[in-house]
Amino acid sequence: MKADLHVHSHYSDGSDSAEKIFQYASNAKLTHISVVDHDTVDGWLELKSLSLRYGIQAIPGIEISAYDFRRNRKVHVLGYQYNPDATNIKALCNPLLKRRQNNSVWQINQIRSLGYDLDKDIVSKIAQPSNTIYKQHIMKQLTEASFTSREYINLYKMLFKGNGIAAKDIEYVDVFDAVQAIVADGGLAVVAHPGQLDSYELIPELIEVGLGGIELIHPDHNEEDHRRIKELSSKYNLILTGGTDYHGIFGIDIKIGDLVSPSLPANERNNLIYFK
């Protein structure tokens, strides 16, 4: 088995269609894939159909944008193998998506005030089929420079970071609520890239509300991150997952399947079974 469990599509802030993602997954000879779009499960029906056509098992996935209010820092939570209706996940995330959309429209207006030729309708078309505008969609209209280029990075930082005119963030959901929503929908909750967001101290606390895993393999993780994650996994009996965090041209230069998960969450008769 070969699985990339961290891929983003154009249903949130990735650039590629679900079809293209499955083409890449097929080229990489993946057996399993999980598209974990931010705060939405809108792409699942298409992913399920493509899974049958390409013979690659699609695992239901999501990445919830959450917050550790005790330590005042962001934390992302991956959810896998939840029930298809995702009732609790949707109830938690839909208001978050509305806040993100409202904030993005505000950011567009702020950037326009600097004289940039930025059109909300055009940005909305760039975002489709996502119903929510992300910063990547705004940047796409502003520049054709690549995500990793100095031109792109400088413009992004000037507008969206520090004292930038569009440097306003949204209110994220409580991380404990995120884990509980995934678990309530029958899924496996996993802390995403703890090395990237420094989520290590939080992990023991989330065990009490049903955390089931930690993401080990991620482009931002180094050997020390791997050591710490494996130690926590062993101590709390947590599954290890991983993937590329692929966003197409809206992310780093990496291909689907370049990084693969060490374990696979598989749902059989509504019970989570972990394959090492």
Image (cartoon, rainbow, N blue to C red):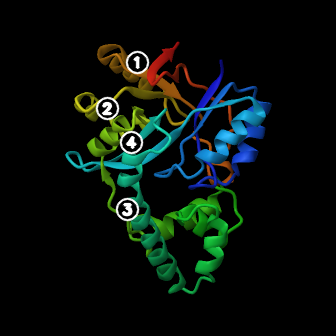
First in sequence: mark 3 vs mark 2: 3
Name the disc covering residue 197, or none: 4
> Three-letter amino acid code at disc 3?
Pro
- Identity of the residue drawn at 55% across and 65% down: 131
First in sequence: mark 3 vs mark 4: 3
- Identity of the residue drawn at 66% across and 71% down: 125
179 horizontally vs 27: left or right: left
Residue at image mark 1: 230
Mark 4 and mark 1 residues within 8 Å of each other at the beta carbon: no
> Can you give x and y, in whole percent of width and height, for residue 171 in the image?
32, 61
- For the N terminus, the image quarter is top right
> Can you give x and y, in whole percent of width and height, for residue 227 in the image?
41, 19
- Identity of the residue drawn at 70% across and 29% down: 56
First in sequence: mark 4 vs mark 1: 4
> Three-letter amino acid code at disc 1?
Lys
Residue at image mark 3: 95
Residue 205 in the image: above or below residue 168: above
Instruction: Give the spatial CA distance, label 4 vs label 2.
Output: 9 Å
First in sequence: mark 3 vs mark 1: 3
Q: What kind of element bears circle 2?
A: helix
Instruction: Give the spatial CA distance, label 3 vs label 2.
Output: 27 Å
Category of crowding for the residue at label 1, using alpha-carbon neighbours closer than 10 angstroms: few (below 14), some (14–19), many (at least 20): some
Q: What kind of element bears circle 1?
A: helix
Residue at image mark 2: 200
